[in-house]
Image (cartoon, helix red, strand yellow):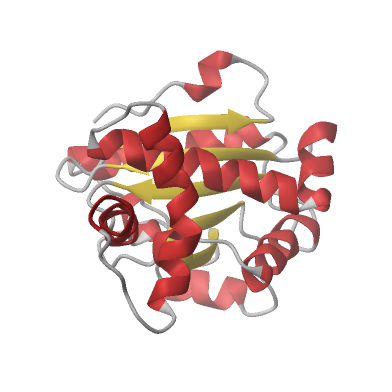
Amino acid sequence: MTSIFDTPAEALEVLLDGNRRFVAGTSEHPNQDAARRAELTPGQRPFAVLLGCSDSRLAAEIIFDRGLGDLFVVRTAGHVLGAEVLGSIEYGTSVLDCRLVVVLGHDSCGAVAAARAAVEDGLTTSGYVRDVVERVTPSVLAARAAGLRADSDFIDVHVQHTVDLLLDRSRLLAEQVASGHTAVVGLAYQLAEGNTRVVTAHGLPTARDAAPAQG
């Protein structure tokens, strides 16, 4: 199975174009009809893997104006990484030949807020929610060490940390990025405006490819 795009930059531009349409209120809702369902019955050819937060306001196909079979989506609270998440992402790039991996964070993230509360106020959580908070805590500590205070800065640091951790833990993905096969991009989504902006990018040829999407 081969990718429908020649380069990761082309895949990213399709996503950013879709987000611009969503912000402008001109979404085209592609690939969402009966013909698309029939086309996908034999198999799937998504063009991007998207690791996003589980927040209900962060529906990837809607905010990027895509449809069935376009995105291979993996979602966890705070886009935290575990073995099953890493395996899913590697499946997307190695088996489905997705040329782009996106880590999508957002403002007002509950997981980041809980981690900040744990660090700054000593507030704790129970059950497996605590595991999520503990995985986000290194990002909060790094942001505080850098003297950052704004919510957007904490979100950016956490997106950056997730991208770095993903490339550090997945040797396969790191090799795909080094070879030019795949790019890994961190995006931050703004709930009120609906737009995304690029936080970090690995595997894109020029700085121009990392320009934020404008609403």
**With 105 as the anchor, is 44 left or right in this view?**
right
Residue lying at the far top of the rendered structure: 207
Residue lying at the far front of the rendered structure: 122
| Residue 179 can be seen in this image | yes
**With 46 as the anchor, is 213 left or right in this view?**
left
In this rendering, is residue 112 above or below 6?
below
Q: Position of residue 42 (x, y in %)?
A: 69, 78
Q: Position of residue 170 (x, y in %)?
A: 76, 53
In this rendering, is residue 43 above or below 153?
below
Residue occupying image coordinates x 34% and y 26%: 147
Q: Position of residue 138 (x, y in %)?
A: 49, 49
Residue lying at the far left of the rendered structure: 192
Q: Nearer the viewer, residue 3 or 146?
A: 146
Q: Nearer the viewer, residue 114 or 95?
A: 114
Dividing the picture into quadrants, the one containing residue 143 is: top left
**With 26 as the anchor, is 29 left or right in this view?**
right
Dividing the picture into quadrants, the one containing residue 211 is: top left
| Residue 4 can be seen in this image | no
Q: Nearer the viewer, residue 182 or 18?
A: 182
Q: Nearer the viewer, residue 115 or 103?
A: 115
**With 104 as the anchor, is 169 left or right in this view?**
right
Q: Position of residue 9 (x, y in %)?
A: 61, 30
Residue occupying image coordinates x 41% and y 60%: 78
Residue occupying image coordinates x 69% and y 52%: 98
Q: For the C terminus, which image quadrant?
A: top left
Residue occupying image coordinates x 81% and y 33%: 178
